[in-house]
Amino acid sequence: FAALKSVNESVKFPDRYFKNNVGSLENILNCIESEEVKGFVFSSSCTVYGQPDILPVTESSPFKKPESPYAETKQICEKIIEEFSVNSKKPSISLRYFNPVGAHESGLIGELPNGIPDNLVPFITQTAIGKREKLKVFGNDYMTKDGTPVRDYIHVVDLAEAHLSAVNRLMKDDADENYEFFNIGTGTGYTVLEVINSFERVNKIKLPYEIVGRREGDIESIFSDNKLSRCKLNWSAIRDLDQMMKSAWIWEKKLKESDS
């Protein structure tokens, strides 16, 4: 959870990403190799697939050329963990996150980026609350239904539950292999404009936004096949896009209340 995670930032500062994400992982694995640790759960990313040839993406989809230094660090880290798990006989699981969004329904836990948000949903909520003048949509000339990029958005609480399922699998010695990896997504792709429309509809707010040029490091479209996660982890996402947008807005409003 201490990894750097901004695709856009990684393009600007690749050395920082390799040093932190790869170097820190190696330190952690060195520490747990001699300790009584049953296994290791890694926060990986769907970016390891690059721009896939076939959608939805399955766990058997090959790693493509990474579109950003961030994606490359996740590919490297997975390879390091696989070797560690085989050599140390400590089972490990990589969870390939798709796009975590939303907040806990209480509004007490959520996402608070440093500076200008790099991800879509916090930029949406900060624009809606008045922290940002206008939301930027990066590109509308992709080969998608409305020209904006497609992503598989997953509620952060569903993601947390996936982690619990992975830990339980290791604790119960249920893993089939020393190293396993699973897609953690909903299996449904939404365009940027569909996410904006969902937010506006469920929260009854009109968002000011503008279309700007594409952003370096972004891929066109990706969403998951999560059959393996359902079968092996006994997990599936249960919260839909509207719930994600509602919870994110509750969190943003709570933040404003705490600041005032």
Image (cartoon, rainbow, N blue to C red):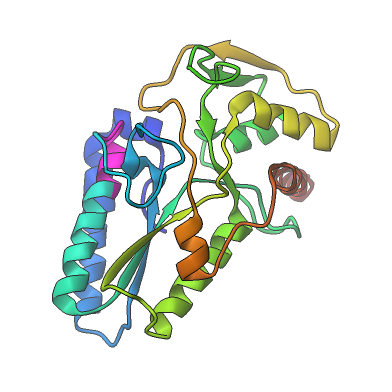
Residue 250 locus on image (x, y percent): 77, 47
* Residue drawn at 52 percent across, 72 percent down: 164
Residue 127 locus on image (x, y percent): 69, 28
Q: Is residue 257 above or below residue 175?
A: above
**Lateral position of residue 220 relative to residue 79, left or right:** right
Please state the extent of the stretch shown in magenta in the rendering. Answer: 66-74
- Residue nearest the observer in this picture, 136 or 244: 244
Majority secondary structure of magenta residues: helix
Residue 111 locus on image (x, y percent): 59, 48
**Lateral position of residue 188 relative to residue 217, left or right:** right
**Lateral position of residue 243 relative to residue 180, left or right:** right
Q: Is residue 129 visible?
A: no
Residue at the outermost left position: 87
- Residue nearest the observer in this picture, 69 or 66: 66
Q: Is residue 27 above or below residue 71?
A: below
Residue 64 locus on image (x, y percent): 26, 36
**Lateral position of residue 145 relative to residue 59, left or right:** right
Quarter of the figure with the N terminus:
bottom left
* Residue drawn at 32 percent across, 75 percent down: 176
* Residue drawn at 33 percent across, 72 percent down: 40
Q: Is residue 14 magenta?
A: no
Q: Is residue 198 visible?
A: yes
